[in-house]
Image: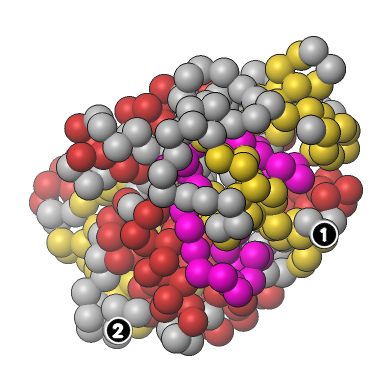
Amino acid sequence: MHFKAAVFDGPGTPLAIEELSVESPRFGEVLVRMTASGVCHSDYHVVLGEWGAKFPLVLGHEGAGVIVETGPGVSGLQIGDAVALSWTPSCRRCRYCVSGRPQLCSNAVANAYRNVLPDGTTRLRRNDDQVYSYLSVGSFAEYAVVPESGAVRIADGVDPAIAALVGCAVTTGVGAAINTAPVAPGSTVAVIGAGGVGLSTIMGAALQAPERIIAVDLSDEKLDLARRAGATHTVHARDTDVVEAIKDLTGGDGVDHAFEAIGRAETIEQAYASLAPGGTAVVVGQVPTGVKISIDPMVMSGRELTLTGSNYGSSRPSIDFARILGLHSRGLLPLDLLVDRRIQLQDINTAFDAMGQGTAARTVIEFP
């Protein structure tokens, strides 16, 4: 079968809309007709050359669609199922999966992180050449072959754009605040970065009834969205000492929970420096390869501070996707705020232009 996809041939070149072919799904795989795909900053890291990859590559890992074909051995999904895609397709056998931490799956690290399927190969072809699928998804295309565990059934009738964002940004942000480092009721929270992940973190934190949530960003537009998402206070970072501003808003103490949702050394250090004694800073954003940070271990021990990472919101996609969508349907997670623009596949490069300008919450590609 032939279909259209946005193909990336390496940094310095725009994505090109091309016709590819796809093989039928093999054992434990499904073929998905895409209905929507978010454009995530992790894709942008690859576009900029900040993360390495093999090419040609179909980017996109934040997707939703409908099952149109199942391979041998697939038992939990059937043709016609609406699904949200997970970029950590768990093997369900390694020690991380069986202990309830599928986001750390050894198989996903060995294969999805190399942009191949669990058997180490790809299903996409450009003429006779193989094409890689980003994080075993490749959602910037009309069709994708993914592992069964990478396609999570969702209820019919969910807006595909919302379902797609649950596949990455929403689960990453909400999960950081309720799974990785659960926000305590009555506590104080800072979220640095109010893009798709940061706004989702704010929404997740708001579910926990903290005393205050302080959102930090450089964009007035994003800070307005942050207030609508649940932030009680905002800090414009362009001309402000972020750490001092956060401490001023907390009576000089700092916050109990600080979430960094950008992926920069400077802002990770700001999150850590803004903590009250006994506080926890969570690195949610993804940094370019090779970036290092500096912290004072004497302060860490003396003030009993915690610095931790969060991968995919410490989520269990097979459980958390439905949980998050249920909260959204009840009006407790205003996920519609995240969809800034809806575009067609041929406009994909404009989405990265907007991301580079820092103007969009989330751009979503919709497929006819």
Residue 209 is labelled as 2
Does residue 265 sit above or below 22 in this rendering?
below
Does residue 111 sit above or below 66 in this rendering?
above
Question: Which residue corresponds to the image point at 54% horizontal and 27% vertical from the top-left?
Answer: 26
The x and y percentages for residue 325 are 46, 71
Asked if labels 1 and 2 touch by Cβ distance under 8 angstroms, the answer is no
Q: Is residue 143 magenta?
A: yes
**Which quadrant of the figure has residue 176?**
bottom left
**Which amino acid, mark 1?**
Pro
Q: Earlier in the sequence, mark 2 or mark 1?
A: 2
**Which amino acid, mark 2?**
Ala
**3D distance between C-alphas at marks 2 and 1:** 40 Å
- Magenta residues, start to end: 138-165
Characterize the local packing of mark 1: few (<14), some (14-19) or many (20 or more) Cα atoms within 10 angstroms.
Answer: few
Characterize the local packing of mark 2: few (<14), some (14-19) or many (20 or more) Cα atoms within 10 angstroms.
Answer: some
| 97 relative to 60 in the view: left or right | left
| 244 relative to 46 in the view: left or right | left
**Which quadrant of the figure has residue 165?**
bottom right
Q: Is residue 213 visible?
A: no
Scheme of colours in the image? secondary structure
Under tag 2, what secondary structure? loop
Residue 321 is labelled as none
| 153 relative to 40 in the view: left or right | left
Mark 1 lies on residue: 368
| 166 relative to 191 in the view: left or right | right
Q: Is residue 121 visible?
A: yes
Under tag 1, what secondary structure? loop
Q: Quadrant of the N terminus?
A: top right
The x and y percentages for residue 333 are 47, 78
Which is more toward the observer, 191 or 29? Answer: 29
